[in-house]
Image (spheres, rainbow, N blue to C red):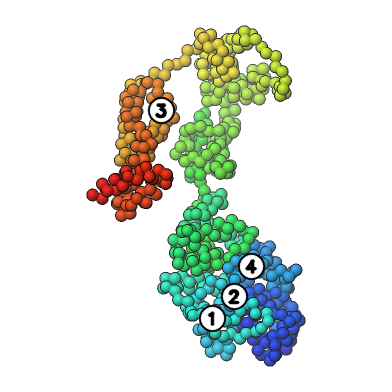
Amino acid sequence: MKFFPTPYPDEIFYSVVCRYHIRSGNNSARQTNVELWDRILGKGLLFPAGIEHLESKFPQNTNLTAERFIAENTIFPFLKPFIPKDRGEIIFEAIKNGGANNVSISSIAGLAWTKFSKQKYLRCCGQCIRNDIMIYGEAYWHRLHQLPDIYLCPEHGTPIVETNILILSLPYEFYQAVTVSNQEARLFKAEIAEKMAEFSCDAEWLLIYGNELGYYEETNKIYDTLLKAKGFRDWNGKTKNKKLGMAMAEFYGKDFLDLFDAYSSGVCQWNLRLLQQANKVNNPMYHLLLIRFLAGSVKDFFWEKHENPPEYLPFGVPPYPCRNKICDYHLADVIEKIFVKRVNGEPRAIFSCPHCGMTYRRKRNTPKEKQYSGQIDIIDYGWLWKERLNELLLSKTPIYIVAKLLYCDIYTVLKFGVECGILEPERLKKRKPYVPKGTNHKKIPVEEQRNYYRQRWKSLRASYPEATRSDLILFDSSCYEWLRINDRNWFEQNSIPPKKSGVDWKKRDNDYLALVKDVVEQFRKSSDKPKRITVSALAKKTGIGGKFYERLSSGRLPETKLFVDANLETSEQWRNRKIFWAVQTLLAQGRLNLKNVKILVSIEHTELKKLKNFIVECIEQARQ
């Protein structure tokens, strides 16, 4: 090949070939295609395949390489950050050496069925054409102008318009850049035009620098950092798609998003497939929308250093307390690091004290201020606890006393005593032997069982004469359960009497009454959506707990029960109070009407007929 035009800035590859055709003086596009490609048809506009074949016809050291054409004269740099690496390498190879099995590059890229591949006509900017003729002596087709959803030229701020040249006709003909338009220039409101100009600048930046960026895997890492930093993604990687979609819809506005078919019922629902289907290619324009929302511009998104999101601390800021009661650092914040993992959506943490070796686990998200009390799951009692256990057992301290001193049950003392070789294995209760399913059990007479468990309980009391009833029950719970159910009178006569609680129920009744009165008043005077006054709601709000209903029914709290019974709400009373609240709230907001009351109170259509008269009456009274 004797000559070939040097590409102009942002010139699309098809335009370079057009200028070759004009300068060669060939009479037909067929003749030019045969010279360039050894075939009668030309290449596509956005994805020309087999550029290296053309490079092989150039003299050496021309600097017109396939890699240069792909980077500077195709839209591959624009797509690269949004394509998975394995697919991107296939696309690059197809543009360079040609596609395989007659599959279009657009299909390989995953864009064949998106709006990105539905452009019908060549597009141009009239001001760019005039400038090109003035600077270079001829006009050419720009890459940026051929990108779908780019409506304004970023250099001149003028509209990009469609010509009358069909893209499907490009393999059969070469067209010089012209300004003959199929349509009038599309005009936008000032605020929309400003956003469109910024959007065009982002697309132009990607065409220039996109080839230097990584593939979608790298882009997704930046997404993860920014989404977590801005509160749209949890630490475990779950994206808050609804919250993100609503925020983007508010950021851009419906009119702007409608230009991209990116608005649906107040949210941007395409975020879900954009962020969670990493192996698929989505419309690149959606990526530009998300990037500008998160980082302000494409340049800042890819080139600025983003701060890592704050560390996820479901159990508060370290250090954490030691819960070993025999440790000198009991309840002191000495645990600097914990191991956190997520099980079934809930965080789990393992804590280990460096001073005593005790390791415990928490099974749910617990604030720091609540970690100094409450139940914990002990994984390992630690070396200090085991040393103290050995000392006590070797000094012949009674088992139940050891259990009290080490804050554990008797069975735990026996278990570790046997493991350490200090206690005889016979001291530890053995598990019942395995009995295969379907085996006929020999029925033991009740009298024989009674004698057995009575003797077992007597032996237990004789072995630990100073132990309390609770200690004995912990040591042999099965014996206790059998006697309590089948031989209760004998058990009570031969057991240590339980300690009396000594609760002053009259004082407790007065305390509960004061708490309940205060909470009921809060429920009735609250400006928030009314909550139904029930026993469970009162128990939760006052902090009395789950035994409140049982204590009311026992008759120990007569004054409190009398007040509660007088103030409990039926479902009808609660519903009427909600309606009255909704009317007052909507009146203050200037939105008072029947429909809004129905929505705010969540009234079903079937119930609306029954309540309509009451709602209308409340509305009329409020407006007077």
Disc 3 or disc 2, which is closer to the eye?
Answer: 2
Question: Which amino acid lies under the numbered mark 4 shown in the image of this protein?
Answer: Ala
Does the image show residue 231?
Answer: yes
Badge 3 or badge 4: first in the primary sequence: 4
Marks 3 and 4, how far apart at CA: 65 Å
Badge 3 or badge 2: first in the primary sequence: 2
Question: Which amino acid lies under the numbered mark 1 shown in the image of this protein?
Answer: Asn
Q: Identify whether 548 is placed above or below 345.
A: above
Q: Residue at x 64, y 8 (%)?
A: 448
Q: Quadrant of the N terminus?
A: bottom right
Give the label on residue 120, or none.
2
Q: Identify whether 133 is placed above or below 229.
A: below
The residue lying toward the viewer, choosing from 538 and 475, is 538
Question: Which amino acid lies under the numbered mark 3 shown in the image of this protein?
Answer: Phe
Residue behind mark 3: 548
Residue behind mark 1: 182
Marks 3 and 2, how far apart at CA: 73 Å
Marks 1 and 4, how far apart at CA: 24 Å
Q: Residue 514 placed where, x, y %?
A: 31, 30
Q: Residue 136 placed where, x, y %?
A: 57, 88
Residue behind mark 4: 112
